[in-house]
Amino acid sequence: MAVRKILRIGNPLLRRTSDDVLESEIGTKDFKKLIRDMFDTMRFAEGVGLAAPQIGILKKIVVVGQEDDNDRYKGTPAVPEQVIINPIITPLLPPGDGFWEGCLSVPGMRGFVERPSKINMKWFDENFQPHEEIIEGYRAIVMQHECDHLFGVLYVDRLKSTKLFGFNEDVETEGKLLD
């Protein structure tokens, strides 16, 4: 198991746009190790997803995966484990009701973000096989959150209001700040 350091908000690498992954990079020893390390890091940090820029790699790679009812996001459905390479997201609905998002790069905090709850996503898997899928609900939110990292965007940039942002222990993720 190789757990890498997760960069935190303020690190300039988190604000840069990542490069596309080339087909020639797929299947190399370094690429396979990077994917394993990303999953190990995500699981160790109890995350739902992790983007390569969060560990200082400016490549368009995301890993996701969560079992039902993750401790960090109570009541959320499972997200299948998968590798997302060079994703393209097209919103199919306007931003919706919103969700209290957290991020491994913004530890201990949550913020309310409105995102489209239905997207069309195109991507390549770890074997560079193309995929296209219409994704809805919580999984659509996760994909948008993680893919934002590939373009130097953090969820704090998308807050509905700075009044809907705070430390986990001071925010009720049911929708309001604690008094």
Image (cartoon, rainbow, N blue to C red):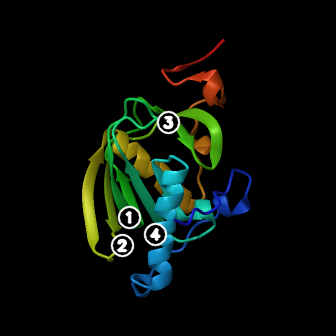
Q: Reading the chain from its start, which is encountered first: label 4 or label 1?
A: 4
Name the element at disc 4: helix
Instruction: Name the quadrant of the C terminus.
Output: top right
Amino acid type of the residue tagged 1 in the rendering: Val
Task: Determine which quarter of the picture holds residue 11.
Answer: bottom right
Mark 1 → mark 3, Cα distance in angstroms = 21 Å
Mark 3 → mark 2, Cα distance in angstroms = 27 Å
Q: For mark 1, does the 10 Å Cα neighbourhood hold few (<14), some (14 to 19), or many (20 or more) residues?
A: many
Mark 2 → mark 4, Cα distance in angstroms = 8 Å
Q: Reading the chain from its start, which is encountered first: label 3 or label 2?
A: 3
Q: Residue at x 42, y 30 (%)?
A: 74
Q: Reading the chain from its start, which is encountered first: label 1 or label 3?
A: 3
* Badge 2 vs badge 4, beta-carbon distance below 8 Å: yes
Name the element at disc 2: loop
Q: Position of residue 101 (x, y in %)?
A: 52, 37
Name the one closer to the observer, 154 or 77.
Answer: 77
The residue mark sitting in front, 3 or 2, is: 3
Residue that carries the numbered disc 1 in the rendered image: 83
Residue that carries the numbered disc 3 in the rendered image: 72
| Vertical position of residue 3 compared to residue 139: above or below | below
Mark 4 → mark 3, Cα distance in angstroms = 23 Å
Relative to 109, 23 lies left or right:
left
The residue mark sitting in front, 1 or 3, is: 3
Residue that carries the numbered disc 4 in the rendered image: 35
Q: Position of residue 100 (x, y in %)?
A: 51, 32
* Badge 4 vs badge 1, beta-carbon distance below 8 Å: yes
